[in-house]
Image: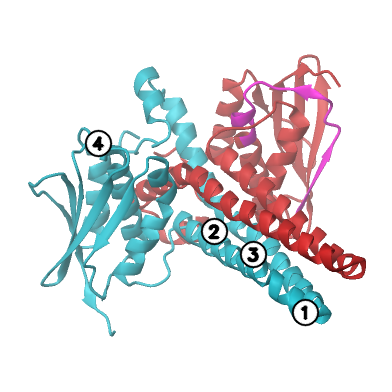
Chain colours: A cyan, B red
Amino acid sequence: MGGLPRSMEDRGRRDSTGESASEERTRAWRGLRVADLSSGIAHEVRNPLNAMAIHLEVLADKVRGVGDELAEAVRPNLEAIRNQIHRLDRLIRQFADFAQGRMPGSELSAIVETSVSLCSFPMRRRGIEAEVTGVPPVSVKGAAPLALALVETLLLGVDLAQVGSKIRIHSEKESEHIRLRFSVDSPVGRPAPERMAMVGKLLEDLGGRLDVEEGPGIFAVLSIPVEPVAV
Amino acid sequence: MGGLPRSMEDRGRRDSTGESASEERTRAWRGLRVADLSSGIAHEVRNPLNAMAIHLEVLADKVRGVGDELAEAVRPNLEAIRNQIHRLDRLIRQFADFAQGRMPGSELSAIVETSVSLCSFPMRRRGIEAEVTGVPPVSVKGAAPLALALVETLLLGVDLAQVGSKIRIHSEKESEHIRLRFSVDSPVGRPAPERMAMVGKLLEDLGGRLDVEEGPGIFAVLSIPVEPVAV
């Protein structure tokens, strides 16, 4: 299982202590079970969310029955709670889709956005932002494996970027391909070769490739076959 | 990577179509990334939950300011929403802990309960219930790997049990060990040997073992070293 990527969370620990083959096997096994169970968790989370949404509307009706003044006073709170319910629902759905290797839609910009959103916590923890520029309206085949490749590349970027800096994702159209160029200012070290190799393999399965490009802070260039979409 | 368990969700598909080594590697890799990202998702989910809880209490204050009658009328809705917020928080925390190989506490009954809770969706989907009897107040070492072994055994039970039936988990104390006997009525087939082997390995790492026991519908007996806890 040498080709398996290491956990972002645990890498520091294991680099210093070493991880036995048995520990690595257990971790891989746990990962599969987590992915399996995540679809159930998404369902389990959505039931309470639905129940909350219903109770909230019943409550809003009762408040409205009393008069306009109170209804107006609680409106911002009701709105805020509704918004959070939607935000939670979206977040959980994105995560469950990713865990199960599903990705609704095929538009590149949406896939990039979802991948950035999935990595928002590891990025925020190190004060890192992603800046995406120039993604044209194109669609891709294999949205789910592409999302996995993008997530891995972003997580590599989180490791390489200075705290508080940016991961830049610049998009360039090149006949039938889009080149997504990932860069950071003053990268710390080099990306782990085994993880880069997995990104490359995923891209090759999609008919794309991982390109090498010299330039300040460029750590990965993903070349992805695309098709135009109606706009 | 032959020792890796197959996904519960996908097994049917892959048994008929076959899964290439590359697909299996991608799936294992995705599983690791899902486990990594789950801690972030738990944080991301808890922020909206906190925001909701705060807005809800502000709203409750405004309603109380108007009079007792309305406050009384909306009380059940407020209570319901508060309860769902707590339920969500607990669910997400359990899942994130499992994903990261953490398990707070060492009491066996709590670990069994959490493992059953994690499997509640796959069980409910097939109308299966878990019935746990006789777990005494004992503590275990290695709560997190034990939870993984219990989840795997429960998922094996979900596969073996008839739709609408029960997975019975019966606990017996035996000097320094607890024997957890898993059984179902009229099992469908036999548990996958590679998955049983992983359960056995996890138990051996904990100083326990997977026992063989003949008997109606018994498919796994987990022998776990325990220590008494103060009650």
- What span is in magenta? B128-147
Mark linked to residue A192: 4
Q: Chain of mark 3?
A: A
Marks 1 and 4, how far apart at CA: 59 Å
Give amino acid for label 2. Answer: Ile
Confirm whether circles 2 and 1 share one chain: yes
Q: Earlier in the sequence, mark 2 or mark 1?
A: 1
Label count reads 4
Q: Earlier in the sequence, mark 2 or mark 3?
A: 3
Q: Residues within 10 Å of mark 2 (few under 14, many from 20)?
A: many
Cα distance in 3D space between marks 3 and 1: 17 Å
Residue B205 screen position, x and y as percent = 57, 21
The vertical placement of B147 against B24, above or below, is above
Q: Left or right: A29 with respect to B184?
A: left
Give me the disc on residue A92.
2
Residue A219 visible in this rendered orientation of the protein: yes
Examine the image and state in which quarter residue B229 appears: top right
> Gap between marks 2 and 1, in whole Å?
31 Å
List the residue tagged with mark 3: A81
- Return the residue at label 1: A64
In the displayed structure, does residue A138 sit left or right of residue B31? left
Vertical relation: A27 (above or below) B154: above
Residue type at mark 3 is: Ile
N-term-proximal mark, 2 vs 4: 2
Q: Is residue B201 magenta?
A: no
Query: Are dots 2 and 1 in contact, CB under 8 Å?
Result: no
Q: Earlier in the sequence, mark 1 or mark 4?
A: 1
Residue A24 percent location from the top left of the image: 43, 30
Q: Are marks 2 and 3 on the same chain?
A: yes
Distance from the alpha carbon under mark 2 to that under mark 4: 29 Å
Position of the N terminus of chain B, as image quadrant, is: top left
